[in-house]
Image (tube, coloured by chain):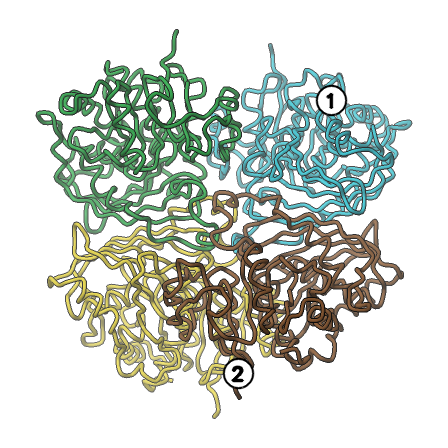
Chain colours: A cyan, B brown, C green, D yellow
Amino acid sequence: MNKIPVAILGATGMVGQRFVQLLDQHPWFQVVALTGSDRTIGQPYIEACHWVLSTPMPDWARNMNMVATSVGAFDARVVFSALPSSLAREWEPCFAEIGMVVCSNASAYRMENDVPILIPEVNADHIELIASQRKNRGWKGAIITNSNCTSTGLTIVLKSLLDPFGVKAVFAVSLQALSGAGYPGVASLDILDNVMPYISEEEEKVEQEPRKMLGKLNQGQIDFAPFPISAHTNRVAVSEGHLVCCSIQLIKKTSLDQIVAELTQYQPPRICKDLPSTPKPVIKVFDQPDRPQPRLDRMIGNGMTTSVGRIRSDPIWDVKMTLLSHNTIRGAAGGSIYNAELAYQAGFI
Amino acid sequence: MNKIPVAILGATGMVGQRFVQLLDQHPWFQVVALTGSDRTIGQPYIEACHWVLSTPMPDWARNMNMVATSVGAFDARVVFSALPSSLAREWEPCFAEIGMVVCSNASAYRMENDVPILIPEVNADHIELIASQRKNRGWKGAIITNSNCTSTGLTIVLKSLLDPFGVKAVFAVSLQALSGAGYPGVASLDILDNVMPYISEEEEKVEQEPRKMLGKLNQGQIDFAPFPISAHTNRVAVSEGHLVCCSIQLIKKTSLDQIVAELTQYQPPRICKDLPSTPKPVIKVFDQPDRPQPRLDRMIGNGMTTSVGRIRSDPIWDVKMTLLSHNTIRGAAGGSIYNAELAYQAGFI
Amino acid sequence: MNKIPVAILGATGMVGQRFVQLLDQHPWFQVVALTGSDRTIGQPYIEACHWVLSTPMPDWARNMNMVATSVGAFDARVVFSALPSSLAREWEPCFAEIGMVVCSNASAYRMENDVPILIPEVNADHIELIASQRKNRGWKGAIITNSNCTSTGLTIVLKSLLDPFGVKAVFAVSLQALSGAGYPGVASLDILDNVMPYISEEEEKVEQEPRKMLGKLNQGQIDFAPFPISAHTNRVAVSEGHLVCCSIQLIKKTSLDQIVAELTQYQPPRICKDLPSTPKPVIKVFDQPDRPQPRLDRMIGNGMTTSVGRIRSDPIWDVKMTLLSHNTIRGAAGGSIYNAELAYQAGFI
Amino acid sequence: MNKIPVAILGATGMVGQRFVQLLDQHPWFQVVALTGSDRTIGQPYIEACHWVLSTPMPDWARNMNMVATSVGAFDARVVFSALPSSLAREWEPCFAEIGMVVCSNASAYRMENDVPILIPEVNADHIELIASQRKNRGWKGAIITNSNCTSTGLTIVLKSLLDPFGVKAVFAVSLQALSGAGYPGVASLDILDNVMPYISEEEEKVEQEPRKMLGKLNQGQIDFAPFPISAHTNRVAVSEGHLVCCSIQLIKKTSLDQIVAELTQYQPPRICKDLPSTPKPVIKVFDQPDRPQPRLDRMIGNGMTTSVGRIRSDPIWDVKMTLLSHNTIRGAAGGSIYNAELAYQAGFI
């Protein structure tokens, strides 16, 4: 089989490295270009990149020469974007215009009316926004975004409850991993024996993005889900894996057993069934009172499963629980790759 | 001045060590006895205790010989109890019966009708429960408790808002320090690169104790404050200082500026004015978006001040904020000592 | 192929769990029994064990019922011992006597004249001590030990230099991982923002064991290698992977290039070539000045490779360098399994 | 008393902040100027500085306006330099030329023939180099340096042994704190669950600086102490406090008891007796096998005492031990202030 040629934009950062790692031996995609800043152009990746993952850099990547993040610098059908938001804003439309499908981890275009934020198990149908996007903008390609890392697991859990019970309101408090801030990111002196109770612009994303993803596609745009989310976001001394404590008000009264059953049995839409990245299970439910834990559970389902535990009654609303999602796999590079698989399956690539 | 002789029950543990540290050179109290398990009796404290604080053990304590936790083993007017709950249940009434005022950090008697949980700035008047207690039980002394370490800062903040605005409901998610679990407590392998999303029996305390402390003394017992609290409690890799993210629904609508003003200007009751442990300020309000932080702010007011920051609108209720309280000072030994000062000032010792 | 039935003694601890993990799908061995303390006997492993590894417990292990660590409680040809030293002293000979080959991670018998401490790449020939052992003790089985976790990587490095250059003296300072102390092991309050500069009985092992392993088999016993080792051992806030800084005095003067070449090209004895656990490479040499690092490099060669870096001149002796070895894989369970493979290949099982 | 006006160069960094903290209420010195980069000039210190110490910023500093690091920007008799080495190289001579005494924490001039590296308890007499310096360079002021943070504690310990026993060779392996790298310094992802086995240019300093400080003043220059030092330097997850494991070869054979006695009784030169910063004791010797520890012992003697423990025989040389020194107090700002006190006492200010 001829694999689909793909490029990674911003390949030397934390998320860029995850793309390189996760695309190694991907059954459908083959990396043909790695882009980086001017400083790195022409260098082999091994020299351009301060690799911080604990699996070795794949051999094919070591000697691949870095190219510029610009039209004409490479040829590919899909580009995975790990660009910072300002560069994403500038460059992603250029690639989309000339026919590439941009699967972006950046927040730059997430809130545009005709750009989907996709989690295949949640809102695979939103991929149809690409049609509007192409029409509106005259693009041959497209921009597809994945959500903020903290929103991802929360949205999957909410989806499994929204359909059977309806959701009225959500409180969500995150304990987020360091890798979410990139590299070098958080200074060690700021987090040793400490918590950072603030992450710039994060709460706004957690309060909005799930509502878009859980909204309904309606005549080429999304009607946001109508319930409010209140978020507190914190950084803790964990390398990978965002934990979210949430309390949820449901519309239809139900039992804890029913809630556990819906989470446990949650099935992705049919189109996800044969995608390489679909996690098995989508949601892992723990009985033990002290799980999920980041160090022990973040790699379940190769880092793509959402883990949930501590499902219990809430004295104010209906249910409270703790969920865990791998932020640089599920919530970033892995999520983008999964979206590209969906786009291919849906015929957009 | 002749100081009041006091004893420390369970003097070798984390909280016991804090009592020793904080009572060093206390203007009113003088430690005359340190109690411990059978293994330690007769040993000098320096040998009995694995001291883990970063200030040196006071000289007077080094050579004080440990005695048993039992009636007759020592004489004192106040006993500070750092006993585990089961031993507290057994022994604290014995000392109260014979005339000692037990200032307890244990949870054993907190929920008894005639036992106050005291935070002097919040409910100094609840000390009058001692009269009921003495009448009910025929004791010459008394048991006074301080609240769970996570409840303490939360209750102080709620008190400052309850009086002017009324409180309808509270969500509270804690990021708690390791010292709260005692020593050896949490295994290092459980917390390195990890979060423990569960602390046994903690959420129940955070959901109930503030409601008792914020309740009204009514004919010799407490009418609990009528609002519900929903708590999630987590352990993070921090040595000291519990952080709590909370969202609060108020009864009377108000502005963020008013809320900040009430927190900033909060004054303790008049009886606290001259107590040695009254913090200045009671509440420290931060403007900076990334404060309070455990490592930087836990020692404000010698570890007795409650710090608050990130006061902002809540998309669901009225206000959200982050607060910090030193768990083994304010939330344990320091709180008990402060309660003893109040009891003395109020004439109960 | 019929696999060889093996048992794991002390299967619920840190090293016991590693045995379970590493023996999952082993090509030669099949676990037929898991032993534990009286409390656990009869329980399925999933209940008896507080699993702390980040890969899930293998399915076959979950429902295997724990048995006693005693003769007659199970039948196996090999027993892997993760017993504490005192229990190892008591029980390992019992199993050896009745014909089982005990591959032990305990220190109890390491220093006996007729018991080999084995690292297959280093001293595979020492396995011949089993003949003396059987003769001396009338055993049908045998006890084979692996070395202390800190000694392991150091011995492999020294071996590669000993043959070509001779070794006259060694300074070794370790920065050891928490898992070496078992679970719960080191208290979190003892290691957060801290180093423990002492590990009980560890330095003695590091100063003696490499000298036995690097000694010569001579008429049924080992003449220890004649050079002294001076060790300082420390515990640091790392989950897995012992780092050792060492300075080495050689007998024959040589160049850094030659030293690098010997380390890089080091080949295990021929008998190791086809053993499943032989690492490829045995020694990984880094050029970069800041490697090896525990988090990034401990899993090289599935945790069985020894990593070396910072090879540079020493102002006093000949060379200094930093080495890294995975302490619960290479230095414990993985090392014992590798020894069993060697024993099987050599015809002793 | 009129205090001596002093300035702090590079006042916003880690070491600059320590200067501000330690000079608060200093009995002899009063800060009159804080210098910083162009960006900060004219700003009040509270805005220019990201304060990361856990005691609050002194009030006098909060509103002091930042000035440029240049001649004419301020007037002072002493300048404390926390400049990076390249800026120190450029600016320190300018201030020395016009009559200021520069007490520098930078390495730029440490190895100049006529510049002393001073530790008052060790080589107070080296301050006489200032006379040569003034003659050679035509300066009215002077440059005095303090040593690298890792060299400091080691040199104090070696001094106490050098006089009675002579020193022939030293191995030293450090486990260094994060604050030594400044702020933001080490990335959190590089040190969580990790050790960094390399610190750029650090080993060279530890191998040379103690030899200069322990050398003899001879006709206006220093004859270096003739013994070699071999250093390995590592970064660990500790906020403050450098630990050094060392093995020492002595010239004169002696006993461990004698070594302990010399360390315990070590007295600084007479001129140090009345300096405000002279630690009491200079060296603290621990009996307990697991001390000193950074978190527990770094603040002994207000962070100026050197702690030593684990004094034991060395299988190769004479003695091995572990020592601890606070790197940003004793090994940086506190050391510079102490040097200024000495310079004043010796009549050079």
Front residue of D237 and C132: C132
Identify which residue is drawn at 41% across, 18% down. C32
Label 1 in the same subunit as label 2: no
| Secondary element type, mark 2 | loop
Q: Quick check: C316 left or right of D144?
A: left
Q: Which mark is residue B86?
A: none
State the image coordinates of residue B61 (x, y, percent, origin top left): 42, 72
Q: Which mark is residue A267?
A: 1
Figure disc tally: 2
Q: Residues within 10 Å of mark 2 (few under 14, many from 20)?
A: few
Q: Which quadrant of the figure has residue D254?
A: bottom left
Question: Distance of mark 1 from mark 2, alpha carbons?
Answer: 70 Å
Residue C150 lies, with reference to residue A21, above or below; the image says below
Q: Which quadrant of the figure has residue D332?
A: bottom left
Residue D213 lies, with reference to residue A180, above or below; the image says below
Q: Is residue B121 visible from the viewing direction of this image?
A: no
